[in-house]
Image (spheres, rainbow, N blue to C red):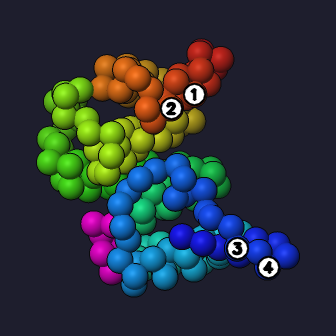
């Protein structure tokens, strides 16, 4: 996904670099790009665009990512939690994982595609829970991430370090 930076030069959006969530349909991609551009100056309009993309195709993991990111950054943690939980459900379905992340096994965690997105979203949930001061829930997610992703492929150690500093 590309957005235009100041000065009119195209740059690759960091969303593409952060997560490999697979190909996005052209219709959803157009809406997501509009939402990313809107997010710079109108978060409500960005949220509306991302929800429009979700209505077009709720299986596109990028949409869930955009929703939980904008709400986490803006401090709207209830909306961030709902979006992350929705994205986690969709990623689990797409990766053929149990809807209950407590039942996931490390050998099921393909670090490409929807399973990676599921792990990344567990990391986001840990951060959101931590920001909501839900310490037990955050700790449980971080412990599970350490078990499921011992090589720290999705960078859960960053959230764990924040946790350690806050604890």
Nearer the N terminus, badge 3 or badge 2?
3
Mark 4 or mark 2, whichever is nearer to me: 4
Disc 4 target residue: 8
Residue at coordinates 70% horizontally, 73% vertically from top-left? 10
Task: Report how far apart the C-alphas of labels 1 and 4 lie in the structure.
Answer: 33 Å
Numbered label attached to residue 10: 3
Disc 1 target residue: 158
Q: Name the spot of residue 87 as percent of width and height, x first.
A: 34, 54
38 to the left or right of 118: right
Report helix, strand or loop for mark 3.
strand
| Residue 28 position (above or below residue 106) | below
Quadrant of image for the N terminus: bottom right
Q: Mark 3, residues whose alpha carbon is within 10 Å: few (<14), some, or many (≥20)?
A: few
Q: Name the spot of residue 18 as percent of width and height, x first.
A: 52, 49
Residue at coordinates 26% horizontally, 56% vertically from top-left? 90
Circles 2 and 1 in contact, beta carbons < 8 Å: yes
Mark 3 or mark 1, whichever is nearer to me: 3
Residue at coordinates 62% horizontally, 64% vertically from top-left? 12
What range of the chain is rendered magenta?
A: 54-61
Nearer the N terminus, badge 3 or badge 1?
3
Nearer the N terminus, badge 1 or badge 4?
4
Between 146 and 49, the residue placed more toward the observer is 146
Circles 4 and 2 in contact, beta carbons < 8 Å: no
Numbered label attached to residue 155: 2
Task: Report how far apart the C-alphas of labels 4 and 2 lie in the structure.
Answer: 32 Å
Task: Report how far apart the C-alphas of labels 3 and 1 lie in the structure.
Answer: 29 Å
Count the marks: how many?
Answer: 4
Residue 145 in which image quadrant: top left
Q: Does the magenta stretch include residue 76?
A: no
Q: Is residue 125 visible?
A: no
Q: Mark 1, residues whose alpha carbon is within 10 Å: few (<14), some, or many (≥20)?
A: few
């Amino acid at each position: 996904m590309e957005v235009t930076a100041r000065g009119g030069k195209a740059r690759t959006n960091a969303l593409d670099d952060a997560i490999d969530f697979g190909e996005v349909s052209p219709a959803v991609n157009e809406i997501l790009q509009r939402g990313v551009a809107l997010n710079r100056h109108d978060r409500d309009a960005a949220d509306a665009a991302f929800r429009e993309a979700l209505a077009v195709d709720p299986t596109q993991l990028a949409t869930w990512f955009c929703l939980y990111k904008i709400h986490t950054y803006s401090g709207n943690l209830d909306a961030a939690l709902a979006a992350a939980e929705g994205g986690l459900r969709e990623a689990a379905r797409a990766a053929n994982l149990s809807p209950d992340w407590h039942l996931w096994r490390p050998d099921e965690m393909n670090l490409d595609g929807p399973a990676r997105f599921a792990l990344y979203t567990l990391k986001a949930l840990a951060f959101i829970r931590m920001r909501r001061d839900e310490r037990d829930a955050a700790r449980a997610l971080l412990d599970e991430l350490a078990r499921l992703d011992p090589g720290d492929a999705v960078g859960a150690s960053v959230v764990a370090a924040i946790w350690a500093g806050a604890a």
